[in-house]
Image (tube, rainbow, N blue to C red):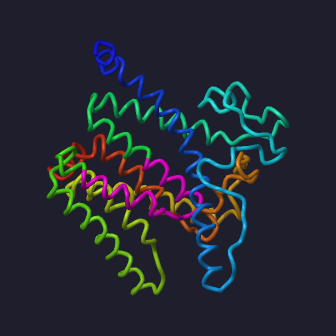
Amino acid sequence: MESLGSLTHPAVFPWLCLAVGLCVGSFLNVVIYRLPKIMERDWEVQCAELRGEGPHVREKFNLAVPRSHCPSCGHKITALENVPVASYLILRGKCSACGTRISPRYPLIEAFTGLASAYAAWHFGFGLTAFAAMFFVWSMIALAFIDFDTQMLPDDITLPLLWAGLLLNALGTFVDLKSALIGAAAGYLSLWSVYWIFKIVRNKEGMGYGDFKLLAAVGAWLGWEILPIVIILSSAVGAVVGISFLYVARYRNKLPIQSEIDFETGKAVPFESLVGGIAIPFGVFLAPAGLFALFIGRAASTFVFSH
């Protein structure tokens, strides 16, 4: 009991969560890359079944199998080469076998996840709220980067996140259940309304259904009162980025950005996909706004709407 008490001490608990967060960040790198691929494989199987084709024998592919490997030489990543952040620094950002450059995005996601987890532990203190906040943080990070890469927000994350928020707030973890229920409904319907207004006026889709579900999840976790600041912040940042891309695309054929190699695929990290056709995934801005709301959104909302 004494050792448990030392781990929950305010001076120790954030550091423990930092270490856990770094490991979770390493796992999130796998989720961000593999979950969309798993979804694509499932869709291909379903399409084959609808066409009346027989089952296709394919290599097993999930979040655990196969092991991560270098796309250039096939070198399988060892446990020592998979230590969050440290391995990247020791290897100087290159494959130990062939020297292929590894994208710095991997250690950055690990570091940010670790730091955000530590901050959640410090901000909320030991207890259910801190652990729930860390789960929310991890989900937002995964969703933001998946949307960044693929312009998809998987139901495998958004829907469990929504229901988890409602269940947690049945205990009053962040807000009361009434505020959470209204937040979930209002979050979904607000963007659903924007979607249909835009589609009727412009005769094309302005966002995807994943955005509705993500904002519904944020509302379920943090309550309806927080939604205006989340929508305003994400829309404002998204508008600034969108206008910047329009300006750059008008005067230059492409952004002069040096590509980094994705260690899973051997391909460049698809940042340029955000410029081609100015297709900007809204979840990239919605998820960070949700993180902002988790920690200081209520105070910011009170300050903004009371003046």
Image location of residue 36, percent across then percent down: 58, 61
The mark tally for this picture is: 0
* Residue at 52% from the left image edge and 64% from the top image edge: 152
Query: Closest to the observer: 298 or 239?
Result: 298
State whether residue 71 is above or below residue 203: above
x, y (%) of residue 254?
Answer: 70, 61
Relative to 62, 76 lies left or right: right
Picture residue at 59% right of the left edge, 58% below the top: 149
**Placement of 197 over or under 79, stated as above or below:** below
Q: Position of residue 98 (x, y in %)?
A: 85, 37
Of the 4 image quadrants, the one containing the N terminus is: top left
Q: Is residue 303 magenta?
A: no
Q: Please state the horizontal and vertical placement of residue 162, each as a whole percent of the image.
A: 33, 58
Q: Which residues are magenta?
A: 139-167
Which residue is more in the foreground, 79 or 190?
Answer: 79
Q: Is residue 146 magenta?
A: yes
Instruction: Classify 156 as above or below 277.
Output: above
Q: Taking 29 as reference, is 189 above or below it?
A: below
Classified by dominant secondary structure, the portion drawn in magenta counts as: helix
Q: Residue furthest top?
A: 2
Q: Is residue 41 left or right of residue 268?
A: left
Quadrant assignment, res 234 = bottom left
